[in-house]
Every structure is written in structure tokens, then in C-alpha cells.
Image: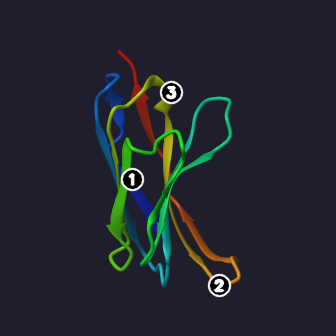
Amino acid sequence: QVQLVESGGGLVQPGGSKRLSCAASGSIVNINVMGWYRQAPRRQRELVATFTSGGSPDYAGSVKGRFTISGDHAKKLVNLQMNSLKPEDTAVYYCNMRLINNDGAILNDYWGQGTQVTVSS
């Protein structure tokens, strides 16, 4: 059984930093895209950051310059360093790992259970 386990969420003051981590366990065979999404109350889940094996990271405009995604596709590890946090960054953050073929079809798709990040004074 495949599991993505996130850690690092919690409460942080505006302007502070948080680092989220995600590790996969179980029988994940192959993935080439890792990323983070978030969902705030009463809003749809949105992309925060992703990166493809051998490619450059892609960020949502609202976090560009403040967040940094990193990881190792072979080891199935992905991190999200969040700096200069704002109250509007408050959300449940979800780790995602997937395999996408050359036609853009998603062949494998795995999600973590989510970790709450609250930015408040």
C-alpha cells in the first residue's frame, strides 16, 4: 500500500518560516513529478509548487520568491521551504507524487493526508 507522509505543519507568526517534508513508503513504482498543493477553507485546492525530474520548479505566482521546492525523485522525498509567510498562506498543504507520460496523461497519482499550516499572530 502506498503512503505519502507529510510533516512540518503547525502555527507560525506572519513573516516566519516553515519547512514541510513528505516521504513516500510502500510500493510506488515510478514517479516523475512531485509537488505541493494547498486548500484553504471554502476554497478549491490549488497548486503551490511542482517540479519534474530533471526539470525546473514551477511556482504559483502568490508564493514565487518566498517558497522553495526541493527533493529527490529517486528517493521519493519532497520538501517545501516557506519563508515570509502571510496569513493568506493558511491552508492544509498536500504532498503529491505522480507519473505523467509524454502526452500529459497521469498514469500514477499519489496524495498525502495533508498537514495544516496556520499563519497568525
Q: Amino acid at mark 2?
A: Asn
Residue at label 1? 6
Q: How are the colours assigned in the image?
A: rainbow
The reply to whether residue 90 is in sight is no
* Label 1 secondary element: strand
Which residue does the numbered mark 2 point to in the structure image? Answer: 102
Q: Amino acid at mark 1?
A: Glu
Q: Nearer the viewer, residue 51 or 42?
A: 51
**Nearer-N-terminus badge (1/2):** 1
On residue 88, which mark appears? 3
Q: Mark 3 or mark 2, which is nearer the start of the sequence? A: 3
Between the C-alphas of marks 3 and 1, the distance is 21 Å
Q: In the image, residue 59 lies at what x, y percent?
A: 50, 52
Quarter-of-image position of residue 21: bottom left
Q: Nearer the viewer, residue 117 or 71?
A: 71
Examine the image and state in which quarter residue 15 appears.
top left
Q: Is residue 56 above or below residue 17?
A: below
Q: Are marks 2 and 3 in contact (CB under 8 Å)?
A: no
Residue 50: x, y in percent?
49, 60
Q: Which mark is residue 97?
A: none
